[in-house]
Amino acid sequence: MNKDVEEMKTKVQPYLDEFQKKWQEEVELYRQKVEPLGSELREGARQKLQELQEKLSPLGEELRDRARTHVDSLRTQLAPYSEELRQRLASRLEALKESGGASLADYHAKASEQLSALSEKAKPALEDLRQGLLPVLESFKVSLLSALEEASKKLNAQ
């Protein structure tokens, strides 16, 4: 039986060798055809990502500029309170130095009271800042998602 198997193997082997040779040639031809497509896809994806970055950069800059505007507005709104607090603390410190008998606990309590008052006065300005930034951030989010969806569609179309 081994002899029969060896004899069959000897007869079939040339066909198998020929098949393997032709198959390797076909695979190489296919690889040569596919390789440029892969390069083209990579280049297209790189270009699309560059286009996306070019579209998103102005949006990010706009968001940054609008946030700066809101922060500057907040700073302007809080400046009087900050100056008022600074003056009150300076006068309290001066009074503390002059009296000499005032306790540190009293000074701490008064400073805490002034900081709490400043915090309460600043809440509306901070809320205005938050309300001003929310639409800007939502708009940026929508623009970003739209740009990503567009880029995804273009990449999928290739």
Image (cartoon, rainbow, N blue to C red):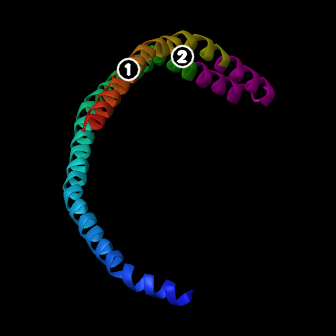
Three-letter amino acid code at the position of disc 2: Glu
Between residue 131 and residue 143, name the one nearer to us.
Answer: 143
Which element is circle 1 on? helix
Q: Image quarter for residue 51?
A: top left
Disc sitting over residue 151 in the figure:
none
Q: Residues within 10 Å of mark 2 (few under 14, many from 20)?
A: some
Q: Is the magenta stretch mostly helix, strand or loop?
A: helix
Which element is circle 2 on? helix
**Residue 103 at least partly seen:** no
Q: How crowded is mark 1: few (under 14 residues within 10 Å), some or many (20 or more)?
A: few
- Up the image or down, 115 lies above or below 8; here it is above
- Up the image or down, 97 lies above or below 4; here it is above
Residue 89, given in percent of the width and then of the height, sits at: 61, 23
**Residue 49 at least partly seen:** yes
Three-letter amino acid code at the position of disc 1: Val
- The reply to whether discs 1 and 2 touch (Cβ–Cβ < 8 Å) is no
Which contiguous range is marked in magenta? 88-115
Query: Mark 1 or mark 2: which is in front?
Result: 1
**Residue marked by disc 2:** 84
Residue 111, given in percent of the width and then of the height, sits at: 69, 23
Between residue 88 and residue 57, name the one nearer to us.
Answer: 57
Which quadrant is home to the C terminus? top left
Q: Marks 1 and 2, how far apart in space?
A: 41 Å
Disc sitting over residue 142 in the figure:
1
- Up the image or down, 142 lies above or below 54; here it is above
Residue 68, given in percent of the width and then of the height, sits at: 36, 25
